[in-house]
Image: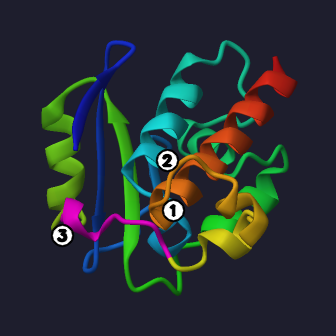
Amino acid sequence: MKLDIREKKVLITAFKQGNIKYAPNAAIMNASRIAGIHHLIAAAEYALSRERRIAKNLAIEIMIMASAQREISRAIDIFDPSSADIKALVIVADSWAEIENYLSENRILPDDSLIGCGEEVKDVFKITEKELRSSVSRDSSRAILNAVLTRMAAFISREE
């Protein structure tokens, strides 16, 4: 999914094959711990809108926002992509050409259809069945996403 957020170009997608090459503007995460595309959109928006960041680089800041954790090491542990079959990618750049270059250099074939509500999300975010039952949404994936977004919003409000 291509977005424009705060005058930046943002690509949110997933991939199965490709290199995991560090870049300060590319957050690569274990997709089984992502609650869906809106989880990553919110993380990117929060990271780009903050005046004072917790991390020095944007990729880590996106992970922090997605995890709703202040501790950098905890955010990295949660989303560590090294053993994941499917990786989620949030890349931020000044132009679409920069993003295409990154994908090409790393042989990444983006596939937005791979982003859904991962099976590990409930455990990672400690979402209870009671919480899911009390959700206004009867769709379990949507209820999980709502619980994660609530945690993210609470985290941001504590930080500001």
Q: How many labels does the image show?
A: 3
Kindly check if marks 3 and 1 are in contact, taking CB atoms under 8 A apart as contact. Answer: no
Q: Which amino acid, mark 2?
A: His
Q: Mark 1 points at which residue?
A: 34
Evaluate whether residue 126 shows in this view. no
Vertical side of 111 occupied by 39: above or below: above
**Lower position in the chain sequence, tag 2 or tag 1:** 1
- Measured in 3D between alpha carbons, the distance from the residue under mark 2 to the one under mark 3, in whole angstroms, is 25 Å
**Where on the picture, by quarter, is residue 46?**
top right
Q: Visible in this render: residue 106?
A: yes
Amino acid type of the residue that numbered disc 1 sits on in the rendered structure? Ile
Q: Mark 2 points at which residue?
A: 39
Kindly state the secondary structure of the residue where label 1 is placed: loop
The x, y position of residue 139, in whole percent, is 44, 61
Residue at mark 3 to residue at mark 1: CA–CA distance: 22 Å
- Which residue corresponds to the image point at 80% horizontal and 60% vertical from the top-left? 73
Q: For the point 25% across and 65% down, which residue is it?
A: 106
In the image: residue 1, left or right of residue 153:
left
- How far apart marks 2 and 1 lie (CA) works out to 7 Å
Q: Local crowd at mark 1 within 10 Å, few (<14), some, or many (≥20)?
A: many
Instruction: Say which label, 2 or 3, has the lower sequence index.
Output: 2
Residue at horizontal 73 percent and vertical 63 percent from the top: 125
Residue drawn at x 78%, y 33% is 154
**What residue type is disc 3 on?**
Arg
Within 10 angstroms of label 3, few (less than 14), some, or many (20 or more) residues?
Answer: some
Do labels 2 and 1 touch, CB within 8 Å?
yes
What span is colored magenta in the figure? 111-118
Helix, strand or loop at mark 3: loop
Q: Mark 3 points at which residue?
A: 107
Location of the N terminus (image quadrant): top left
